[in-house]
Amino acid sequence: MPTNSNSGRDGQISVARKLLVLIEALSAEGAYIDKKEVARRLGLSDTETHLLFYLLLSTDRGEYQPLPFASDDSLSYIAAHASLQPSLFDRRPALTYSETLSLAVVFRALKISADSPLQKLLSPPVSSHVVSGKLIDRVVQPEVSDTEQARLFICAKAIAAQEKLLFSYRHTNSLDKNKEHPSDKRSVLPLEVVWDVSGWKLEAFDLKKHDTRTFFIHRMKNLKATSLDFEELRQAYLPAETADVPRVTLFFDDKKYLSLFGWHDLQIVQDNTDDALSKPIDSSKLIVASVPFFKNEWLPRHVLACHGHVWTDDPALINDIQNLAQKLLRKSDNR
């Protein structure tokens, strides 16, 4: 007697089990199954059996590999015109380049010897990608020269102080020190220092090109930080026809955060710190100030860096702070 078809997850599992039974029966070249015999042995209706046969013959839909099966127009039988071994079940999935690099880095970090059988996982047929030993070295233990460390320190200080950076930037990534490479002068507002397998980089807003760019630290020369002119900020981030810079309100619960960063053109609106000892006040609003908001990442970054001691009630700035926090979390997850 035909079985009742189940619904939901149990029904899907039941169908999958039946398909596996049929695939096993067709695993050898020349294997043959008859629809009526399958229905009788599995207790299925003609419709249910027809559906199973249809699924077996539809594996080439989308990006899946077709099974080596054939049938007639009425799906009265299915025959295997080739063996499923080893082309389907025995074939190992090939590693991507990123997976190969990750595995090689793990082997290096764990000091897996070169003659270990595990090293075969980095060779065909498991992986066809060649990973440079120098690249693995940089990932496991990145080398930073004294010169590069000094440049990183200058960049970090400039980010904190909202200063601009001036430097000559080499156009090529060549390390040939005996060859002159073209370079040009850059004036940028630094936003973030980042590192990946290609080295240390500075993300910055180019004040001349009016766009955010990424610069390799090791390509910089004559790097120096200097004060950022307020007019440069206005011209960089606001349309030419904009006369006034929009301002937002910031709340500080500790006076030290006023001097932690160089808040450009910060104006104190209310300062309750002098009265803190004489009368009870709302400690969440000790200092109220206004600052210009140029719609870039600098202000959101610095509010985040104050770890809840500085905040705002401006919807646009709140939105930018939330978006930046999510962006930084995604970067952290990917590293």
Image (cartoon, rainbow, N blue to C red):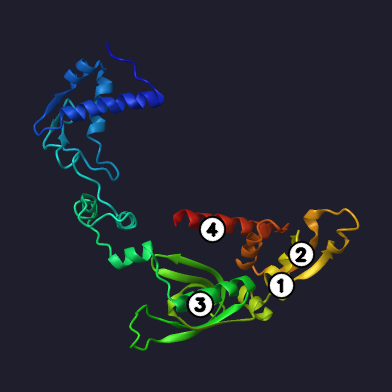
* Residue on which disc 1 sits: 245
* Residue on which disc 3 sits: 150
* Residue on which disc 4 sits: 328
Residue 296 vs residue 331, the one in the foreground:
331
- Horizontal side, residue 257 vs residue 43: left or right: right
Q: Say few, some or many: other residues with alpha carbon within 10 Å of mark 2 (under 14 / 14 to 19 / 20 or more).
A: few
Q: Is residue 31 above or below residue 202?
A: above
* Amino acid of disc 3: Ala
Percent of width and height locating residue 220: 46, 80
* Amino acid of disc 2: Lys
Q: Quadrant of residue 100?
A: bottom left
Q: Residue sitting at 31 percent across and 58 percent down?
A: 108
As helix, strand or loop, the secondary structure at mark 3 comes to: helix
Q: Which mark is residue 255?
A: 2
Percent of width and height locating residue 58: 25, 36
Q: Is residue 27 above or below residue 262?
A: above
Q: CA distance from mark 2 to mark 1?
A: 25 Å
Q: Quadrant of residue 84?
A: top left
The earlier-in-sequence mark between 4 and 3 is 3
Say whether residue 211 is visible: no
Comparing labels 2 and 1, the label whose residue is closer to the camera: 2
Mark 2 vs 1: CB contact within 8 A:
no
Q: Residue sitting at 67 percent across and 70 percent down?
A: 261
Quadrant holding the C terminus? bottom left
Q: CA distance from mark 1 to mark 3?
A: 35 Å
Q: Is residue 227 above or below residue 76?
A: below
